[in-house]
Image: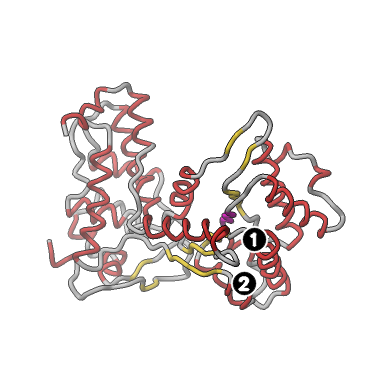
Amino acid sequence: MAEQRNKHLLSERERLILLNNIYIAHPQSQEILKKMQRAHRSKDISPEPKSMSIIGPTGSGKSTVIKKYMEQHPPSIKAKSSQLTIFNAVIPSDSTPRKFIRSLLTALLAQISNCKPQDVPVNLVNDQDSDTTKLRFYKYLQDSGVELIILDEFQHLISNKTDSSNKVLLELAKTIKVMIIETGIPIIMVGTGRASIVFDVDPEVSRRFHASVEMRPFMISDDDNFKTFRKFLAEVDKLMPFETLSKLADKELAIRLYAASNGFIDDIMRIIHAAGEEAIEEQASCISLEYLAEAFENAPGKNQTAEGNPFRTPINKVMSWRCIQDAYKGIVTSSDTQGPQKVRRKSTQLVKDIF
C-alpha cells in the first residue's frame, strides 16, 4: 500500500497518464476474451470458422474488451507494410453491400500500409464491378495473414429508414455469410442489441455465429451485485495516483456513482477521470465529492437518468430517484433503449436493505 500511495510523488504529467490508463476488467471480460479466443482459433482447428457476436448498449465496455484482445495479438509491423493477426473495422452507417465492402477494403489497405484511410489510392477501392472489389478484399485478407475479423457498430447494417425485411439488409447478411465461406476467417460482430436483427433475416448467417455474448452494465439489484460493483470501484481507487484513497467503494458514494451512470462502465470512468484530473491539477490528496459533482455537471454520461446532481443531493433523496428504484428491481435504461428494460434480478434482497 505504501508503494501504491507513493504514486502521488510523481510529476503532474505522469500522474495524469497513470489516471487515464487505469484498466480494471469488466466482470464479464474473462468470459468474453475466452470466447473470442475460441472463435479465433477455430480457423485452424474446425471444418468451418466459428464466428460470434458481442452485443451490448453503448457504454457497456465492448470497445475496451476488443482493445484488450487486440493488444494481446499485435500486428507484425515492417517498414512499408504490416502482417495483421486481426483486422478490425467500423461498419459505416446506412451501408449497402457495395459501400460495406469498399469501406472494409479501404480500412484493410490502410492498416497493412500503415497509412490513413484517406491516403489509400482511390483506384484500389473504386471498381465499377463490386465483385472485383470483393475479390480484392478477400485476396488482401489472405496475403496479410488475417486470422480474425472484428467488425464494430454492426447495427449500422440496419437502415433507420427500413425494417428487418429490407432487401438491402438481406443482401448485407448474404455478403457476410459469403465472406466467412470464401475466406475461412471467423468474424466477431460487435454492436448494440438492435444489431441482432441481422441474424434474424437469414438463418444461414445465424448458423455460422456459434456464440453470442451480451455485455451488461453493473447491477445493484441484490447484495451480490452491489458487492461486485463496489469491488470494481475499490480496485479503481487503489490504482489512482493520490496520497489517500478516495473511498469510491463506500456504500453512499457507490450509490451516487451508480445514479450518475446507471452502472455503465464508460460513464463511470469518464466521471472518475474528469474528477481525478481536476484533483491532480489542484494538488488534492484524493478525489472529493465536489470534484465528482463538477465532473458530472461538465460531462454527464449518455446513459444516466439522474434527477439532479447525485454528488450534490442528499443521499436519501438520491435513493428515492427513479433510476435507483428501478435499479433495485433489476431494471436499467440506456441511451440505446426506448425505455427501461429488465436485465436480471437474482433475489428479492435489495440494496436499500443494507444501508
Magenta segment, prevailing SS (helix, strand or loop): strand
Q: Nearer the viewer, residue 197 or 277?
A: 197
Is residue 89 in the magenta section? no
Q: Quadrant of the N terminus?
A: top left
Tag 2 secondary structure: helix
Q: How many marks?
A: 2
Density class for disc 1 (Cα within 10 Å; few <14, some 14-19, many ≥20) is some
Which stretch did the figure color magenta? 148-152
> Which x, y percent locates residue 353?
13, 67
Which image quarter: residue 351? bottom left
Badge 2 amino acid: Val
Q: What's the distance in space between the residues labelled 1 and 2, CA to CA? A: 14 Å
Left or right relative to 308: residue 352? left
Label 1: which residue?
Answer: 184
Q: Nearer the viewer, residue 101 or 79?
A: 79
Label 2: which residue?
Answer: 205
Q: Nearer the viewer, residue 236 or 207?
A: 207
Tag 1 secondary structure: loop
Q: Residue at x 44, y 51 (%)?
A: 65
Badge 1 amino acid: Gly
Density class for disc 2 (Cα within 10 Å; few <14, some 14-19, many ≥20) is some
Which image quarter: residue 245? top left
Indicate which disc residue 22 carries.
Answer: none
Does 134 sit above or below residue 332? above
Q: Quadrant of the C terminus?
A: bottom left
Left or right relative to 122: residue 118? left
